[in-house]
Structures are given as structure tokens and as C-alpha cells.
């Protein structure tokens, strides 16, 4: 029967099912299959970890509470008749392959980048037998559960899928790093907002939360050895991530297959440290700020000071050792030279040691990175540390390319691994004005707005040699929060940030062999957006509902 | 003592108090005044209408629940010492002047445009005596209560203001029409979203809710004589504004000093009518849509058909007669000629009557406008009806200028009253992409994003002669909802839509005699934004919180 089945599969428009990111390998049929009230997810795993059981519980809950109707005229009402006699799916059986150890998802999620197993296989039959999900890791099972949870719709209380049988063999990500960055320093986000964001990330299989936790504007992080940084540098006592909050967030993320890559940006973007340690900050809130920083307030760590370098290394070590991730970012973007030129202490420090500023920066960076490597961690830096400064970096350093997508070639030419976060594709804050108060033009520096279509057409391998391509770990969309706050977190991020999730999971090719493209993506992006809304994430409309119900009808040339 | 008092007033920076829109006349001092637990608002009005009493109740509630801390470093903690001995304000006494009739606010709010009394005077002394609010109408008292409610901050449970005495004499709006338009057809908004929007509108003294209720994508309005329009043309049975919903919204708006100007857009933008009355719609969902409409789906009323004209007039009459407003919009934008050229029935109707399309449009418009004038109402139309078509309009017709701010001159040159809603300043949806699915560039037609600064610098009287200036009723910002939904309603509208509230209330000059400008506006706009958030409206951050706490410090040249 299998060959016949495959023929019917080839005819079915696989793009209609709302899977996001679409599996790299997918066969679907045309049969409706419904879930009986007795449907269960059976975990055939010895000593299953609690976070896997919790993920199963959440999946079962979504099956009951999503109540998403099909995005079609009539919202699937025409399915009612066929549903009466449709086959049922008694259960989903999940198991580990090859005697894989039943480690917690949270343990699998923080393995070194490139060594994680996220693949899975899933079959949902249409003959009344059970669905089967297998993987070589609990993390892979979690990814498969996520896919399974996107198959289901509601018809007057009946939960069903409409393109069974569904067969996914060895779906696994094209790139190991698929992230989202949130800046919690320019404006503060409560733990509940971060958790909701982690949930939404997990629904589209993003696996790294890049937490740009502190910056010049505020220091909302309680660092165990330096509590004064937050108590004096946070916006208020209620706008601090305590050690317990951090642990809670890391745990919540890990259980959802997400590694938390924290960044303590140095030596720039550190004004808030001056609230408790003015001795370490040059050009603290100097005026005019535009002579000393890319945005207010000015202030940078006195990188030529041995005391400041030591303080910074201790600070980083103190927080990094509390985190399970093997990655930690020391930042390194937008260093302002004039700030140091005008800082008498820095000039004295340089003069005393007979070093140039670049030499001092190198020493400083060696110090902060040693703090990380002593903990067995891999440093992450912004691209300037490679392209603009004469800094010696461990060759396994991960470099974030942000200024321009065109810079990926230069960084990989130096043989560093990269994460794509280009402002010309992935900056979610661009295009909605400028936060500089009295600018009458008030356009954002990275105009225009980065549409989902723009982000979706990003090519991670463009302009790179084969050798360079092997250095691409993946990428992420980023939210800098000059003009964002809890009030628009969901609406500015979702569903746009889902586009890079598919770019880096699915890769260049759709399962039917055609190139990934915006036309085919839109109906599925609608689907995951409406599903996110059902689950409590305020993802915004991409089109009038009229268009969402009629795939293709509102396209440019339709 | 008064002269001395006035001297201290002149020195105080009146822009710091978070009043929005800033009164046209304002004197402030430097004294802290707190509210005792026994503070009360005394209504010295005979037979006060219930909606005035309700407004008093809401104001008292805000005083307790806003709990907004001052936007200053320390959030007003330095006020603690002085508050201990600060004078208290025992009560606010409100009364009507000149034996004005105690009519409900909702009655005052729907008086003909230009005849409403919105002015008030308010004094908040610092000598322990009571505050006094007077007006010549309950609507004016409501505006004054709104101002009073913006004076108060929280300091560890103490509610206080910090620039008493406050004296406002005859604050009244520069322009009688100050609106906000919401499109509820492209995507649907539940009644609760509209009510929350009406609340936010009232907080900044906007007085007209332009309800673009139906359009080509859906018909969510239950019209008494034509229930089939919504039952077949709405997105779903749960996405319909019932007659009871409309009454509820109108009542809610009226009690908040807001007139509901409903629009049934004709003869274009009417595809959704075809779901129940295909006989009245030309080029219904014709393809390619771009040949028949500015956006999908195509479909326009058969304006040359006598039956369609009669149907449309009855439809408009049926709903308009349920509404208290004297204004009602018949739309008239973006008429597509090719739709009628290609419609055999329209061509036959024209041929039979020997009329041109423009002549038929004139007849059609006379018919729909007669339905309104028969009800004593004034028609409102989009600018094309004046600038692009040979239509005879009643001279009291109100014309909305939307295509360009440059068109105000041409419309007023024809001696029509105008409402400014220019897409180049006031379209809130611009600049965040395009809803046309497969457009790879996906920029919005009205790029770039209209920043609050751009909107705030709008000059309602630019390029107009004195005679033309007298025809300017006011203006509004507008939200077309191709890419908006309940998920981002607040965040895309607020606080941006507050900018035109000040443009049209305060006019060109601040109370200190200087020209209205973005530098002086920003601290107050922050203040109303943070207050909106406290009251449950998800208004977004305009800057990092760091900047909001330090007026001017993040300005371009600071």
C-alpha cells in the first residue's frame, strides 16, 4: 500500500498544514483523523525525566485548549460530515532510539553548540493505529511533540487533523543555533514576559535565548558577588532579576529546549555600573553624549585599569558560573575611542604601562575571556571585536554579525564561527521611529522596518565559500528595547521572529524540493500566528482576516 | 499675596506636570499638596446627570489606583520629607456656571460640531482650601475632571501633586473636532477593545470616535433592517456588533464626552455586501484584484442601479437613525472606474438612462445623502468626493482630507469644512510592512512610519487663507487594520494618537507663549503614556526608562 499512499501524498498541498518551521522532510495525505476523548500520549521511556513528562502534559493541554479552527472559508465547517466517520488516533507513543539515555531536556538543551541532537521522526497514521514519535534524545522528542501539537484543529469540540497520514522522517535543523535576543536593560521586562517569550520560542523550535541583560541604561541583574550593581544600577528594586529569577528562567528555558546565552556587554554599554562603581567608568554620562557614545548615556569600563579588568573578570565569572550554558557573551560592540581619549585616568593608565588603547583592550579581553575559559565556557562577542579591533580571541569564539549581513564574509574569512543577527534583516526594532527625544526627523538609524518577508528571504550562506559556510552556526532576530516595553513585546516580536526560526531550521529547501519562498510561507505563518494568539501570545495580524482565510487570494498578482 | 504667587509661578517649569493635552492657559506653583484619606469630589449641581456622577466616581478611582510615581530620578522619593508637612486638599468642588442646564455629558457630547461647550476652569490651591472646577456644561466639567485626574502622583501611598497652586482659566479646545478612526472590518475588535480605546481617548480629551465599521473584507455590523448583511458578511457570528453592542458603545462613548461618527463606506469598499446581496455588487472578488481595487478583494456597489441606490439609502437610514450623532459618513474613497467599465449591468444601467458614470455617482450620492439629511444629519465624505468627482454635496458636508496634507487647501478652496486625517502625518498603520502576501519588497504604500514627532509637528492651518482656516474643524489619527488586531491595538495607537489630541486642543502655542514643540512635549507625553499603562492601556515606551526619568538628557544635542 505504501507506494499508493505516496502518490496521494504527492498531490496534497503540503503547505496548507500549519507546521512552522516546516519539517525538512514531510509527507501528508488527505484523510481526516480525529482524537477520541481517551487519546493519550504514552511515554515509552525508562525513567523519563520530569521535564519530558511536563512537556507531554503541555502538549496534551494544547490539544484541548488551542481550539484553533482551520484558516479556511467556513473555518472547517465543511469537515463536519466527514468527521463523523473519520478514523481516530488512539494515542501517540513516544520513545528513545538506540538506548539513548533519558536525560532531562534541560540537560540536552545546553550541550555544546553543534553536539545537540534535535532530530525526530513522527508518523500519524490514518488507519486507526497509534502515532509514533521517536528520537535519539529527549530534546528530539520535545521537538517532535512540538510538531505534533501543530497538527490539530477544532471543529465544534472535535480535535482533528485533516492531512493524515503524516510522515516525518529524521526532521532535524539545518543550523544548530536558532535564537532570539532580548534587551532587558533599556526597558525592563518582568519574568512572566520572558517566560511567555520562551514558550513562543519553543513553539517554533528556537533553541537559544540571547539575554542582553544589562546595558548603560540599567543593571537589572543581581550578580551574587556584586549585589550593589543591581541595587544601585537597576531602575528600581522591583526591576531586578534576582539569582532565583535567573535560575527560574534558565530552568524554564531548558525544559523547553532552550539554552540561555547571557551577555554582559563590555567594555562599552556599561554606564549603569557607575551607579555603584564610579571608579570603573570613564566618561560617565558625559555631555554631549553623542561625542562619547552611540546613544545616551555615555560611559564605558576603564579598560586600561588593572583594577577594572579584574573587577570585570570577577563580575563575569560570578554570574557565568551560575549558568549551565557553555556560551557566554562579553559583548564588545560600539566602543567609543573619544571616551578614553578624554578620560584622564585611562590616559594615565596607558601612559604608565606604555600601551596603546588597542593593546589595553586586548589585555582586558584576555582577562574577561580567561574568566570564561576557566569555567570551561566559550566566549561570544559582537563583530567589532574581530573586524575593528586588534584583539586576540580563542579560535572557538562565536562572533555575532550585526552591523550588516555583508560582514559575515569578513568574519568567517578570519575562521571564526558566526551567528547571523544582521541589522538589515533581523533587527525587530528598526523603522518605527527614533528614541532620541528632540530629533525632529526621528527616523531610526536602521530604517526601514524589517518586514517578515525581508527576514524570511535571508540566505545564511550567501557570499560565503564552502569553508566559510561551515562556520555558520545559525542566526537570530533581536529586539533592542529603546521603544519597547512589556506593552509591545509580543506584538513587535511575533510572528516576525518566527521567520528566522524557519530560515535556520528548514534551510533553503521546502520538503517538496522547491526553494523556500514567501508565497508558500504565508499561510503557515498565519496558522502559527493564530495558534500563538490562542495560547496567549499577542502575535499580530499579517493581513486582514479575509486574506488569512483565503491563501493566495490577496497576493500581489492574484 | 497673589502677585508674589504669580512670580513664583512664572519661574516654575510648567512643562513638567504631566498634563496632556496641555491646557491653553496654565499657571503652576512649586508647592506639594497631598490628598487626605477624606478627600472627596463634591458635585454642586442640581439634579446631576448620572454620567457626570459616574465620571466623578471614575476620577476618584483613578486617584487611588493610578499610583503613578513621578518620572524623575528617585521617582519622587525626595518629596517624602516635604510631604509630611505639606498642605492637604480637602475636596474638589465642581459646579456649573450661568445656570447651565445639568444635561447628561452624553447629550452635550453629540451636539452639532462647533456648538459644544468643552471649556472649564480649575484651581487647585496650596493653602488648605478646596479645589474648584467650573464649566458651562457637564461636558466642560468632564474635561476639567480629566485634567484634575492627571495632576496626581504616588509616594509610598500618599497621593500628591507637586506644582500647586495650579490655576487654569477657561481652558477650551482650539478645534472642535478631535478624533480617532478605527477600522473594524479588515480585522475585528471586540467591544471591550473599543471601550478601552474610548477610555484612552477620553483621557486626552479626544471627542470623536470615527468608526469605520464595515469594508470590503467583512461586514460586522448588525443593521436592523438588513440582518443578513452581518449574518452572511461578518467573519463569524461572534464577530458582529449587534444593535445592543452599538448602543452600548455609543452610550459608553457619550458618557466620556465622545461622539460616535459611524461610516458606511460607499460605493467602493463594499465587497462584503455581496455575501448577502450579490445583486448589488459589481466586480465581486474579480481577479486580478489590482485591476479592480486598491486592495483585495474587489467589489463595489452598482451605483448606476436604482435598486442598489435605494437599498444603500435604506441601509444607511436604518443604522443612522439609531445613532445620536449629527454626523454620519458615507465614505466615497478610492472608487475604481474599471470595475464599472467591466460590469455589464452597470453599463446597461448607464446606457438605459443615458447617464455618464459621474452623473450616476451624483444621483447615487444625492440619494444616500438625502437619507441622512431626512434624519437631520450632516454627511461626511472622504476628499475624493470633492476633488476627484463631479458630485453635488450639501455645503455643510464635512470632508476628510486623507491622501495628502497638501490637499487641505484644495478642499477648503471649495468652501467645505474639513477634518485633517492626512496619511503623511496621521496614518498609524504606515511603515510596518505591507499586507499583500507575496510582495517581496513589502513596504507599505505610505512609508515611512509616522512617528509621534512627525504627527506632533502637524500644522492644521498651513497653506490656508484666513477664510480657509475657518473651515478647519480639527483632525484625527487613523488606524487601518490590515496588519492590526486586538493583539496590537493599544501598542500601535498609544501614545502616538495622543499627539493629535494636543495639536487640536492646545493649538499652536503653549501656555507660556512659546510655540508647541517636541522638546517640551516629550516629558509630558511620557507622563500620559506611563499613566495609561497604569490604567490598563498598553501604550508603548517612547524611550528607555532611563531617558523618561531624565527630561532632556537623551535629546539629540544633550
Image (cartoon, coloured by chain):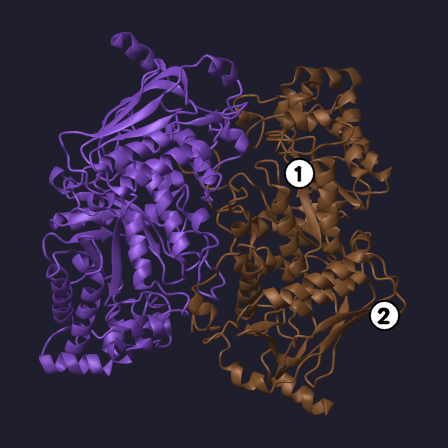
Chain colours: A purple, B brown
**What chain is tagged by disc 1?**
B
Q: Closest to the observer: A169 or A272?
A: A169
Q: Is residue B112 above or below residue A530?
A: below
| Res B213 label | 1
For the residue labelled by badge 1, is the local secondary structure a helix, a strand or a loop?
loop
Residue A5 position within the rendered picture, expressed as x and y whole percent measured from the top left = 30, 11
Q: Is residue B172 above or below residue A477?
A: below
Residue B36 position by quadrant? bottom right
**What chain is tagged by disc 2?**
B
| Res B97 label | 2
Q: Is residue B431 left or right of residue A313?
A: right
Q: Quadrant of the N terminus of chain B?
A: bottom right
Q: Residue at x 42, y 22 (%)?
A: A36
Determine the CA span between mark 2 and mark 1: 38 Å
Q: Is residue B114 above or below residue B59?
A: above
Q: Residue at x 41, y 35 (%)?
A: A62
Amino acid at each position: 500500500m505504501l507506494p499508493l499512499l505516496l502518490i496521494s501524498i504527492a498531490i496534497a498541498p503540503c503547505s496548507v498544514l500549519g507546521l512552522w518551521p516546516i519539517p525538512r522532510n514531510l509527507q501528508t495525505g488527505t484523510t481526516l483523523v480525529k482524537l477520541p476523548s481517551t487519546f493519550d500520549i504514552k511515554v515509552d521511556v525508562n525513567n523519563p525525566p520530569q521535564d519530558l513528562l511536563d512537556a507531554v502534559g503541555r502538549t496534551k493541554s494544547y490539544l484541548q485548549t488551542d481550539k484553533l479552527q482551520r484558516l479556511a472559508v467556513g473555518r472547517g465547517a465543511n469537515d463536519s460530515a466527514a468527521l463523523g466517520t473519520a478514523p481516530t488516533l488512539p494515542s501517540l507513543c513516544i520513545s528513545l532510539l538506540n538506548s539513548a539515555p533519558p536525560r532531562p531536556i534541560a540537560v540536552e538543551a545546553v550541550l555544546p553548540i553543534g553536539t545537540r541532537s534535535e532530530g525526530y521522526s513522527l508518523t500519524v497514521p490514518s488507519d486507526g493505529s497509534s502515532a509514533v514519535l521517536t528520537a535519539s534524545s529527549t530534546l528530539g522528542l520535545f521537538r517532535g511533540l512540538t510538531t505534533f501539537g501543530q497538527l490539530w484543529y477544532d471543529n465544534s469540540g472535535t480535535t482533528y487533523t485533516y492531512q493524515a497520514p503524516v510522515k516525518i522522517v529524521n526532521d532535524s535543523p539545518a543550523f544548530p543555533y536558532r535564537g532570539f535576543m532580548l534587551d532587558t536593560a533599556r526597558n525592563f521586562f518582568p519574568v512572566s514576559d520572558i517566560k511567555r517569550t520562551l514558550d513562543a520560542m519553543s513553539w517554533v523550535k528556537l533553541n537559544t535565548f540571547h539575554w542582553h541583560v544589562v546595558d548603560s541604561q540599567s543593571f537589572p541583574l543581581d550578580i551574587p558577588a556584586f549585589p550593589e550593581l543591581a541595587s544601585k544600577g537597576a531602575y528600581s528594586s522591583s526591576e531586578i532579576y534576582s539569582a532565583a529569577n535567573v535560575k527560574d528562567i534558565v530552568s524554564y528555558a531548558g525544559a523547553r529546549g532552550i539554552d540561555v546565552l547571557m551577555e554582559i556587554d563590555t567594555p562599552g554599554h556599561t554606564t549603569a555600573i557607575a551607579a555603584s562603581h564610579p571608579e570603573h567608568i570613564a566618561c560617565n554620562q558625559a555631555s554631549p553624549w553623542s561625542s562619547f557614545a552611540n546613544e545616551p548615556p555615555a560611559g564605558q569600563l576603564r579598560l586600561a585599569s588593572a583594577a577594572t579588568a579584574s573587577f570585570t573578570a570577577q563580575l563575569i565569572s560570578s554570574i557565568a558560573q551560575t549558568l549551565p550554558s557553555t556560551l557566554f557573551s562579553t559583548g564588545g560592540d560600539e566602543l567609543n575611542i573619544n571616551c578614553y581619549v578624554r578620560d584622564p585616568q585611562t590616559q594615565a593608565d596607558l601612559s604608565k604601562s606604555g600601551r596603546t588603547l588597542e593593546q589595553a583592550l586586548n589585555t582586558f579581553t584576555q582577562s574577561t575571556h580567561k574568566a570564561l575559559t576557566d569555567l570551561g565556557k566559550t566566549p561570544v562577542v559582537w563583530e567589532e571585536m574581530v573586524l575593528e579591533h586588534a584583539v586576540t580571541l580563542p579560535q572557538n569564539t562565536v562572533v555575532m554579525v550585526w552591523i550588516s549581513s555583508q560582514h559575515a564574509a569578513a568574519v568567517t574569512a578570519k575562521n571564526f564561527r558566526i551567528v547571523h543577527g544582521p541589522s538589515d534583516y533581523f533587527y525587530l526594532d528598526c523603522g518605527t521611529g527614533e528614541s532620541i527625544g528632540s530629533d525632529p526627523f526621528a527616523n531610526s538609524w536602521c530604517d526601514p522596518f524589517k518586514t517578515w518577508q525581508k527576514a524570511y528571504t535571508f540566505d545564511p550562506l550567501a557570499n560565503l565559500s564552502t569553508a566559510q559556510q561551515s562556520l555558520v552556526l545559525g542566526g537570530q532576530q533581536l529586539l533592542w528595547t529603546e521603544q519597547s516595553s512589556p506593552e509591545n513585546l509580543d506584538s513587535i516580536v511575533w510572528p516576525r521572529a518566527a521567520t528566522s526560526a524557519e530560515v535556520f531550521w528548514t534551510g533553503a529547501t521546502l520538503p517538496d524540493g522547491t526553494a523556500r519562498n514567501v508565497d508558500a510561507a504565508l499561510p503557515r505563518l498565519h496558522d502559527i500566528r493564530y495558534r500563538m494568539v490562542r495560547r496567549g501570545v499577542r502575535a499580530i495580524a499579517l493581513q486582514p482576516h479575509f486574506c488569512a482565510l483565503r491563501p493566495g487570494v490577496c497576493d500581489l498578482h492574484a
